[in-house]
Image (tube, helix red, strand yellow):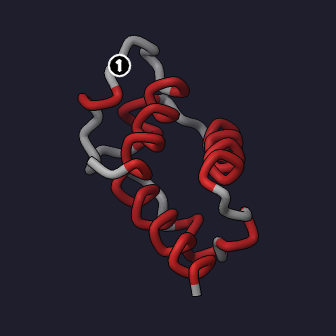
């Protein structure tokens, strides 16, 4: 598991309801809102926190990127793409 995936899993677990979910137990394909109760507001807070921790600016994401984030896997791919943009 990459550092990026580990960090994202940790923050999803900290944000999720119920809060007792283990980061490594997160299914990367399930809907974050339905499975973990991550509302739009919580998603904004999650994205902001991840951006700070991972050294990515929120402006690295466009509307399509943000609209396409429904699962943990989507979140990982979005941050991988944003990090590639930073490295370029």
Image-quadrant location for residue 46: top right
Q: Is residue 25 above or below residue 85?
A: above
| Residue occupying image coordinates x 51% and y 24% | 14
Residue 48: percent from left, percent from top: 71, 48
Image-quadrant location for residue 22: top left
| Residue occupying image coordinates x 29% and y 44% | 30
Q: Nearer the viewer, residue 57 or 64?
A: 57
Q: Is residue 51 above or below residue 41?
A: below
Using a 10 Å C-alpha cutoff, classify the residue at mark 1 as few (fewer than 14 neighbours), some (14 to 19) or many (20 or more): some
Image-quadrant location for residue 67: bottom right
Please tell me how many numbered marks the rendered image carries: 1
Element type where label 1 sits in the image: loop
Q: Nearer the viewer, residue 84 or 29?
A: 84
Q: Is residue 86 above or below residue 47?
A: below
Q: Which residue is mark 1?
A: 21
Q: Quadrant of the C terminus?
A: bottom right
Q: Residue furthest bottom?
A: 88
Residue 59: percent from left, percent from top: 75, 71
Q: Is residue 52 left or right of residue 13?
A: right
| Residue occupying image coordinates x 70% and y 40% | 45
| Residue occupying image coordinates x 51% and y 78% | 84
Q: Is residue 88 above or below residue 81?
A: below
Q: Nearer the viewer, residue 66 or 22?
A: 22
């Amino acid at each position: 598991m990459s550092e990026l995936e580990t960090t994202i899993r940790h923050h999803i677990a900290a944000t999720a309801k119920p809060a007792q979910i283990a980061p490594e137990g997160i299914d990367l394909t399930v809907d974050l809102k339905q499975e973990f109760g991550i509302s739009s507001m919580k998603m904004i807070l999650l994205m902001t926190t991840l951006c700070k921790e991972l050294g990515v600016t929120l402006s690295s994401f466009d509307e399509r990127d943000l609209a396409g984030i429904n699962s943990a896997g989507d979140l990982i791919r979005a941050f991988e793409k944003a990090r590639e943009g930073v490295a370029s």
